[in-house]
Image (tube, helix red, strand yellow):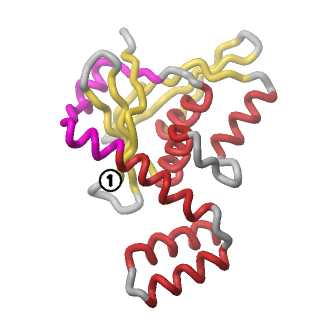
Amino acid sequence: MNLIRLYVKGITRSPLQKKAYVLILQESESDINLPIVIAESEAQSIAYELEKKNIPLRPSTHDLFKTFADTFQINILKVVINKLNDGVFHSNLYCDYQGTEYVFNSRTSDAVALALRFEAPIYTFPDILEKAGIYISLQQEARIQKNTSEEQSFKSQFQRHSLSELKQMLDECVENEDYEMAAQIRDEISKRSE
């Protein structure tokens, strides 16, 4: 069966799930898009790699894996989104180590984050694209691109602040009744405290 090449189009917040995002992969030959719901940390990791300008102070797990793989001369050859069960996408990472190809099962969000870092192609099968693919209007596409950039900028503004500075910012937001920003800062504080 022929594989279909996909490219990362962008990331947007999920309208249905709090703290979830939608990764949009686009088929190279048409306007069919594959939307995949992913968690916040993977969305952030993918957004950092797409933007390549707001580098986090500490490496993500995906960055660490890339450094590890480079050190031991392991290369990711490709990612194949190979299964769709009950709305969950499954993927395989195809790796090369000393001339031998290895295949590893992976969450699709992790596989895409690594594919971007290794500049490896992303593929899927026609039946998966047929089942889950959608067309996105120009207006929706503009919103996805805008959300990807805004999300990256928003996250990076917190990265450069210490925990004590974030707590002070949180107090100021509550005092000024800016509860939406306060919730975002609270989430960043909670994430760092885990």
Q: Indicate the position of residue 185 as horizontal and vertical percent values.
A: 51, 72
Q: Indicate the position of residue 151 as horizontal and vertical percent values.
A: 44, 54
Query: Quick one: quadrant of the C terminus?
Result: bottom right
> In the current view of this chain or complex, which residue is farthest to the bottom?
175
Task: Please tell me which residue lies in front, 172 or 133.
Answer: 172
Task: Please tell me which residue lies in front, 159 or 101.
Answer: 159
Residue 14 left/right relative to 190: left
Q: Which residue is at a point 51% across and 75% down the rendered structure image?
A: 186
**Label 1 packing within 10 angstroms: few (<14), some (14-19), many (20+):** some
> From what the image shows, is residue 6 above or below residue 42?
above
Q: Give the range drawn in magenta.
A: 122-145
Q: Which residue is at a point 51% across and 50% down the rendered structure image?
A: 44
Q: Which residue is at a point 55% across and 29% down the rendered structure image?
A: 115
> From what the image shows, is residue 130 above or below residue 47?
above
Q: Is residue 88 visible?
A: no
| Quadrant of the image occupied by residue 169 | bottom right
> From what the image shows, is residue 58 above or below residue 144?
below
Query: Is residue 36 inside the magenta stretch?
Result: no
| Quadrant of the image occupied by residue 167 | bottom right
Q: Indicate the position of residue 175 as horizontal and vertical percent values.
A: 45, 90
Task: Please tell me which residue lies in front, 175 or 39.
Answer: 175
The residue singled out by tag 1 in the image is 14
> In the current view of this chain or complex, which residue is farthest to the right?
71
Q: Which residue is at a point 55% across and 46% down the rendered structure image?
A: 45
Give SS at disc 1. Answer: loop
Q: Indicate the position of residue 64 as horizontal and vertical percent values.
A: 71, 42
> Could you tell me the amino acid type at mark 1?
Ser
Q: Is residue 18 visible?
A: yes
> From what the image shows, is residue 150 above or below residue 181?
above
Magenta-drawn stretch, dominant element (helix, strand or loop): helix
Query: Quick one: quadrant of the N terminus?
Result: top left
Task: Please tell me which residue lies in front, 125 or 85.
Answer: 125
